[in-house]
Amino acid sequence: MRKKIVAGNWKMNNDYQEGMTLFSEVVHMVKAEVNSSTEVIVACPYIHLHSFGQMANGRIRLAAQNCHQAEKGAYTGEISVKMIESVGADFVIIGHSERRQYFNETNELLAQKVAIAIKQGLTPIFCIGETQQERESNRHFEVIREQLREGLFHLVKAEFQQVIIAYEPVWAIGTGLTASPGQAQEMHAFIRGEIAGVYNQEVADATSILYGGSCNPKNAPELFAQPDIDGGLIGGASLKARDFTDIAKVFNDRG
Ligand code: PGA
């Protein structure tokens, strides 16, 4: 059975105190309401990781939103995988469309980030997704295949098995437009097929593939009911403890 995962991506929101307040609400609600079989992850800004690590009590696991591709050195302003691990995070988001778009992160660079994260024991949540224009010109499958090939498929099987994938159509992120459950399922099945082609069916069946893009408590139940959708990467709705917990609860009665 694949792991069911609900991960919140706070992006660049909340100062230190605001973050502390929100996180303590999330810890409280998730502990009380979400089945322990659902993995709940919060990807907060770096400044929160250490404090949240002390508050999470093992129930919520932490992710950084980015990392640098080098082990260490003269890269002013950057944060390494080792640093992230040293404050208690287990995951790192790599290749979010905002990083690709605003910070010019290419598949080639992302492949390096994935490699160092895996080598040093941090689990990548690797994001892929097509733009609206790419979907309208019917290139979405091609784009996703390329992102997978160039960003992830350099990994050997044992490394790839550490990866979580998040499919986030760029046109759905922060826009209120969600992929329909059918559109999302179609792409998730395609992604799983690509993984099976490169590694094998067993590896593909064990890979958690999350959906992201305007996911909320209303649309999550139908999205998460799709056979190839194993949870969500939640942006806006993760900034409200109630909404985030309601999304994380979706798997409660599904065993
Ligand atoms: P959204 O963001 O839920 O606000 O659309 C999702 C994401 O960017 O991970």
Image: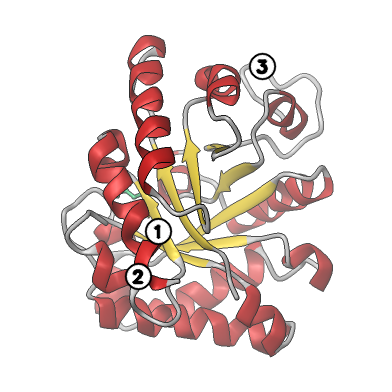
Whether the residues at callouts 1 and 2 have beta carbons within 8 Å, the answer is yes
Q: Quadrant of residue 208?
A: bottom right
Q: Disc 2 marks which amino acid?
A: Phe
- Identified at 35% across, 46% down, the residue is 33
Residue 25 position (above or below residue 127): above
In the rendered structure, the answer to whether residue 215 lies left or right of residue 142 reads: left
Label 2 belongs to which residue?
224
Q: Earlier in the sequence, mark 3 or mark 2?
A: 3
User: Percent from the top left, x then y, of residue 202?
Assistant: 70, 85
Q: How far is mark 1 from mark 2, CA to CA?
A: 8 Å
Amino acid carrying label 3: it is Thr
Q: CA distance from mark 3 to mark 1?
A: 33 Å
Left or right: 236 with respect to 100? left
- Say which residue label 3 marks: 76
| Circle number at residue 206 | none
Q: Which residue is mark 1?
A: 232
Q: Is residue 172 visible?
A: yes
Residue 139 visible in the current orientation = no
Q: Which quarter of the figure is the C terminus placed in? A: bottom left
